[in-house]
Image (tube, rainbow, N blue to C red):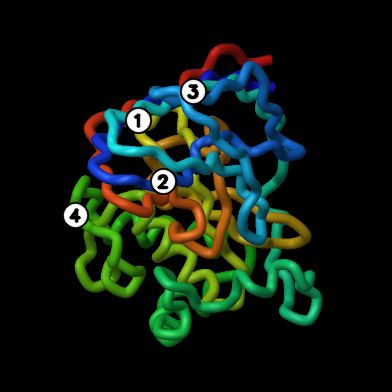
Amino acid sequence: MTTIQIGCNLSYTVSQPTSFLFNVAAARTLHQTICDESFLINPAINFEPVNVGAEGILVYRFSVEPCELNIQYHAQAELHPDVYDPGGIFETEYPQLPNEVLPYLNPSRYCESDRLANFAMRLFGNIPHGYSRVTEICDWINNNLDYEAGSSGESTSACDVLIQRVGVCRDYAHLAIALCRALCIPARYVSGYAVGLQPPDFHGFFEAYLGTRWYLFDATRMAPTEGFVRIGTGRDAADASFATIIGSAVMTTITVWAEQASQV
């Protein structure tokens, strides 16, 4: 078991009545136990914790009048990772895929897998199917893209990244997801906190469905997957954005941390 202290501090200047959805709380899963959790808002107002989306992501929902807004979240995550042999993990044939993973084969806003089918087959079609093929996809992305903060925006998709050959963590994940889906491997976006990430920030990973379960990958190779604390899961980053803002608010401060406290 690994214990990780996580949290964030977010500040905004709000210039008109504005509604927020904050997706910063760590998820509760079979492999991730959350305790000592706190979510604070200044100025103090009522907020509503709600579960949204197909994966039931926990978000904090509230509205504020014009103000200087500060959000603080912190928690302790206890991780209980599985131990597995990558060499024994194979892809699942389409007829055997569970119904609940089928949506993660479809193209989505940022992952145009239908446009990348020929490219994916040309590069990865002859690679042995399984965990190793997803690893090869991550290797190719890592070797052929440059990581550059601020190089992409809210409209940047997997196809854009493939052309520009530059991006940030969410772009690396989107391209990997699109290539996996193009090869009939269900794949989905995962946001979270990451131990060892420099500079510290929210991080974008992805999962591929192999055998009978989901496996976590990071195409950036900037943080170890065993130190990842999951926040949200979705078709792409549109389903797992850390903040959705309806109104007018400008971010003035963002601080994110994930620090390993102990390992047993």
Find residue 129 and report its horizontal and vertical position in percent.
62, 70
Q: Is residue 96 above or below residue 247?
A: below
Distance between the Cα atoms at labels 4 and 1? 22 Å
Which residue: 78% across, 81% down?
Answer: 95
> Of the residues shown, which amino acid type is indicated by label 3?
Leu
Secondary structure, mark 1, is strand
* Label of residue 40 in the image: 3
152 vs 236, left or right, is left
Quadrant where the image shows the C terminus: top right
> How crowded is the residue under tag 1: few (<14 C-alpha within 10 Å), some, or many (20+)?
some
Distance between the Cα atoms at labels 4 and 2? 20 Å
Which residue: 62% across, 59% down?
Answer: 53
Distance between the Cα atoms at labels 2 and 1? 10 Å
38 vs 253, left or right, is right
Closer to the chain start, of discs 4 and 2, is 4
Dot in front, 1 or 3: 3
Q: Quadrant of residue 34?
A: top right
Answer yes or no: do the residues labelled 2 and 1 have beta carbons within 8 Å? yes
* Label of residue 151 in the image: 4
Closer to the chain start, of discs 4 and 1, is 1
Find residue 67 and report its horizontal and vertical position in percent.
29, 32
> How crowded is the residue under tag 4: few (<14 C-alpha within 10 Å), some, or many (20+)?
some
> Of the residues shown, which amino acid type is indicated by label 4?
Ser
Residue under pointer 2: 243
Closer to the chain start, of discs 1 and 3, is 1
Which residue: 36% across, 49% down?
Answer: 169
Q: Is residue 119 above or below residue 214?
A: below
Quadrant where the image shows the N terminus: top right
Secondary structure, mark 2, is strand
Closer to the chain start, of discs 2 and 1, is 1
Q: Nearer the viewer, residue 137 or 16?
A: 16
116 vs 225, left or right, is left
